[in-house]
Amino acid sequence: MTKYLVATDVGGTCTDTIVFATGEPVRLGKALSTPPNFADGVLDSIRSAAVSMALTLEQLLSQTSLFVHGSTVVDNAILTRDGARTGLVTTAGFEDTLLVTRGAYGRWGGLTEDRFKHPVKTDRAPALVDPDCIVGLAERADYKGAILVDLDEAVAEKALRHLIDEKHVDAVAVSFLWSFYNPANEQKVKRILERIAPGVYCTLSSDIAPTPGEYERTSTTVINAYAGQITRSYLQSLEALLAKTGYREPVLVMQGYGGLLPAHEAAERSIGMLECGPAAGVIGSKALGDLLGHPDVIATDMGGTTFKVSVIQNGSIEYAREPMVDRFHYTQPKIEVVSIGAGGGSIISLEPGSMAPRVGPRSAGSRPGPVCYGLGGTEPTLTDVFMLIGYMDPDIFLGGAMTLDKAAAYRAFKEKIADPLGMGVEEAAFGVYRVAAAQIADLIHEITVERGLDPRDFILHSFGGSCGMLAGMFSQELNVKQVVVPYTASVNCAFGLVSADIVHEYSTSTVLPVPSPAALVNAIFEPMTAKALRQLKDEGFEGSRVQLEWSVDLRYSRQVHQVTTQVAAPTPLDDAGLAQLIADYEALYERKFGKGSAYREAGIEMTQFRLTARGLMTRPELAPLPLDGIDSSAARIGRRRVFVEAADGMAEADIYDFEKLRPGNVVTGPAVIHTPITTIVLQDRQRGTVDAYRNVLIDFLR
Amino acid sequence: MDPITFSIIRHRLFRVVEEAVITLKHVSGSAITNEGHDLMVSLYRADGSLLMGGVGFLHHLTSAAEACKAVIRRFQGQINEGDIYLLNDPYTAALHTSDIYLVSPIHHNGVLVAWSACFVHVFDIGAMNPGGFAPDATDIYSEGFSSPGIKLVAGGELRQDVWDTLLNMVRGPEMVALDLRSMIACNNVARERTLALVEKYGPETFDQACQLLIAQSEQRLRERLSELPDGQWQSRQYVDVKGTVHRVVLTMKKQGDRLIFDFTGSSPQSKYSINCSKWASIGGLFAPLFPLLCYDIVWNEGVIRPIEMIAPEGTIVNATRPAPVSVATVGAIQSVNNAACSTIGKMLAASERYADEATAVWHANHFAIFMFGNNQKGNQTIGILTETFAGAGGARTFGDGVDVGGEIPNPISRMANVETIEATFPVRYLFRRRLRDSGGPGRYRGGTGGEMAIISHDAPDGGIDYVLSGKGTKFPMSDGLGGGYSGSSNDYVWIHAPKDGRNTDRFAQTLDGITGDKEPISWGVFPLRGDDVLYVRWNGGGGVGDPLERSIDMVRDDVLGRTISDEAAREIYGVVLKDGKVEPDATAERRKALRSARAGLEIAQ
Amino acid sequence: MTRRRASQTLVLDDGQVCCSACGHGLVPIGQSWKPRARLSSVAVASMPGAGLGIDQRLELRLFTCPACAALLDSETALPEDPFLEDIIYA
């Protein structure tokens, strides 16, 4: 009987698995990631979950009805420069577009402010295409999509043969000016290539990123071609490996925009897999928010190296405006996740001169790791700080699987931080903790303010192994409504995978002035809708299991900012519905960009029409457990001294074992709750309640 | 002050400036602010001294401080909570009239604790030419609205009379209104967030932290200066306008922990609007100083204290009223930027420890080309050609300059996509690419500049017009370092379509391939109509070291990569190539010959 | 006695400003060294890559070591303009 739903997310360090079955508790699995052959780690991870279920890997997989997957394989290929030898075919006269990166944009893009201020030491990253593999062809379209110069196919063929036979490229990216309005010339190139060299991977800019802005579009096309074969091979071999081990059902793959695609489609869109892990994390957060009835969520995830934040507003997830992978720009719908270098492994240092403590951005990762791990780390990290202020218990880390060396952490911190500061070890440790919390609070504040939002209207989700030790502190500073530390905090990305739907994103770039008849808008959506329905039907979705969402990018004609606005009215639109869209756009614009920021008299334009087509997946039902009373004393395992902000130092606090807490139990801070994979700290005047799903909800008593 | 609290307050102050910048860009929505990053937001102490300078166009950090001080002097006793002051007079503090400062006092419990200031280059300022650069101006009276300090918002209430008066004088008043509104919003955010900080830590702690921030910056720069050798280094920048050659001459002296920039010897002020005021020169020298000497130091009053400037009155770098200055930012100020970059580079290169921080001059010649007219949608449009923000990186002592790599005074600029310009203006690009042979030769090559050509396309009036305030055609000014040669110059060419309409290739891929009379231009208002083409090429960065010492393989790669021509490889670098391959013997001979040719006359004493 | 860096191409050694390639002493420390170097000039307008409107009189001055011909510095100038003087004090 097939009953399991298995989701595995391959991250940079760990590969996490979650196994669902109706009526059974959720099972978790973890293994180290195994680059470059990530598929091995996938099986290791699923096996570790199987073991906890007293099953073999084969037994688990043969009873699995659906396998959902996210992987860092494409991010990794870009970071390690491990992609195909790629050629670029572009409009003659504009061969340098990719190399010039719109000027300094590629030189400072992806760098932090302290690097901007130091231009002499910055450089552009070398392009993914060798300059001598770029060929310009005589062809030209204009801003209306009119073809001014036709493509000479004989010349094109000669150029392609040159790239393949003399330059030995294995992949070709094609990007012509204005191709998204008129892809005819690009398609001619593709047909020639298919005829003369069908084995060469080919991406057209009009297919992969039909949006204006030739630099970003070209860069996107190149990245997709560069990582194309790797992605295909990876997914094909993963499917084969799973089949051999007993799983022969569909494999669904997460995309950076937070939706799933069947593996054979994901295999053709390598760019879609960029940052799919963090995207899954946000989907997981949204699913949790939906479950608990919270439409406004700040989702935070603190890993070993980075602290990530994203914002869900009124159930809507935001797309990144200028996404980048490593030092390369691209343009795709991609969930906006902002990160800073503040994770559990972030190294604590003192700035020369001012002696101001800094957290990160360098990280000790998991190897050599924090000093207290005893794996060779010599520089104190944030995890060591958590240890020194009493939040971590050296004997019960990872359920006792690893003993932590507190003395070593103490020595390293004293020598490198406390003594130079002329402070006691504990005092210096509280100080660093406060700096970390303040930095994170500032980041979150900036992100919400940037969107015209107020953190006080939000619930904060705390994901990741270390977040629970800081969340109470920075959330109090931000004045959020409540903090939720989810039961699945450490495997959030995997949880997100199973909460996602199949999603196809379509878009058409064309400019329509406002007002325009609604019929014109409907005419633009019609072909996209037809395509979407066909595609979803092929994947087994029809009728009530199909959901189509329209949205439109609008701008004020004389200003640069574009805002993607969801169509709330029924579709196809009537004129009243279109008027509603315009009104929604104006309200959204004002919220995001400030009162009086709109120059309405210049007129409004609609520039991009987007269709999000969902095949609705059956979400695993989390069965709420019955609530016990509020008495948590049975879970209390002792007391010890920990840092309490309100006491401005160490104070006695109750220590709890999460496994012994029952739904409904209440824990009053200051207190520390240890779970097998994470630790939750409640400050003074904070109260933690275990809910029916075993999430810990932290309320602020004001 | 404990380092923890200090660390947090300092971090918060950075965020205050960042959030204010975001607000500025958001509310404005203009291309020049969002793409060109032609903006600045900074915080100042109660006395107007710079507290925290953000990343933007760096020559404004010190001028805005002077604007705060000017407002303090003028409005003594009447500075109230919720006021916002406008100042754009170049002879009081601003760089030119288009760059409007809005300056806001920040009061806590009735006590003035700080100022915030910001600027954008507004859409228009009512000068005799649209866009704010007035190459035809002969005095400041033709350069538009100008105020030495006026209250725009009084206690939170907009002064409608001031607002209406300013907007009454400018083209595109709605766009200028947006620029002003964005600056008001920006200052409001800066004020709110700064006050939140003061509230949380108390005014005494805040004050202490500010003092410490400044003291630390001063200490760190003085330490660094003390580590550098004592000496003097000179630089000279030529500026040609309509046949008149002007010079900006700089002697930079370093003594102990003091650095003096002496512009004695610079030309008298010009009748053309390339002049700049004293404030602009100070800003101009700090623009490279901050990133070159203070890359790891907070930019504030502390790093200003060890620096002095001598600029004789009545010279091009300290013009007196009513000399015209509207082109200052791409005129004398840029010459000051370049001269200071060069001398600072030489000083760093004289130090074992700091040699790798030295650089040749980047992107010496901005060009302000403002197109105006009816676009293909029938809308009146004014806008800048953003290639001027693309720039070119100067070579370093450890590597080449970055091709089309930007500039030092505006660290995070970029140019617009071709498609963005073609959608907004009735023009079509023929090409846009790196410019071969434009990078200053050297052991390490300067980054290339670029070239582009545009033609009118679907223009309802048959074309558009443009204001050109260009320089750098006669004198290439991206100076090299340590023997490296300067980057190439700029060129602006109006190609008149052949009158008989024959043999007109408007998809030509090179300047030579575009048929028609080629008229070099640089200054004035010009039309782009019919099949005429505007061709622009912009400078490369300066090189470092001897071109004859450049690795032969790197020269070959440059030729194959089309950044250096075969001819330049042979004539300048001494590398002989045939069919893309190096000829070692011919190369050795050529290099030897070039070295001998240099053994010229020894100078008689 | 101690050899110290003075620029990309020069060192201070034993009270003199010297070519760092061969050690040739040009001038005592504190003086301008360019008058003691070999000078050759090239017309900037004649070089590959020169712009279309370069001033015909503009020259690229190359200062080389009289002993070993190493390039010590260069500057771009009009003929009537003096050498740029870069001097380390002590």
Image (cartoon, rainbow, N blue to C red):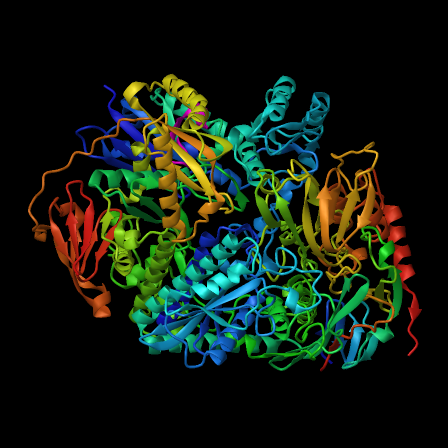
* Residue B432 percent coordinates (x, y): 69, 42
Q: Nearer the viewer, residue A457 or A271?
A: A457
B491 relative to A519, above or below: below
Residue A102 in sight in this render: yes
Spot occupied by residue A563 in the image (x, y as percentages of width and height): 43, 42
Q: Residue at x 91, y 64 (%)?
A: B599
Q: Quadrant of the C terminus of chain A?
A: bottom left
Q: Position of residue A337 (x, y in %)?
A: 40, 46
B220 in relation to A516, above or below = below
* Residue at image point 24% right, 35% down: A27
Residue A385 lies, in percent from the top left, at: 32, 62
**B215 in the magenta segment:** no
- Looking at the rendering, the stretch of residues picked out in magenta corresponds to A254-266
Q: Quadrant of residue B2?
A: bottom left
Depth check, front residue: A598 or A165: A598
Question: From what the image shows, is residue B31 above or below residue C41?
Answer: above
The N terminus of chain A: image quadrant: top left
Q: Can the viewer see residue B358 in this picture?
A: no
Viewer-proximal residue among A196 and A532 = A532
Q: Nearer the viewer, residue A557 or A159?
A: A557
Judge whether residue A259 is colored magenta.
Answer: yes
Residue A380 left/right relative to A489: right
- Name the residue: 77% across, 62% down: B241
How many numbered markers are drawn? Answer: 0
Say above or below: B212 vs B441: below
Left or right, residue B37 beside residue A649: right
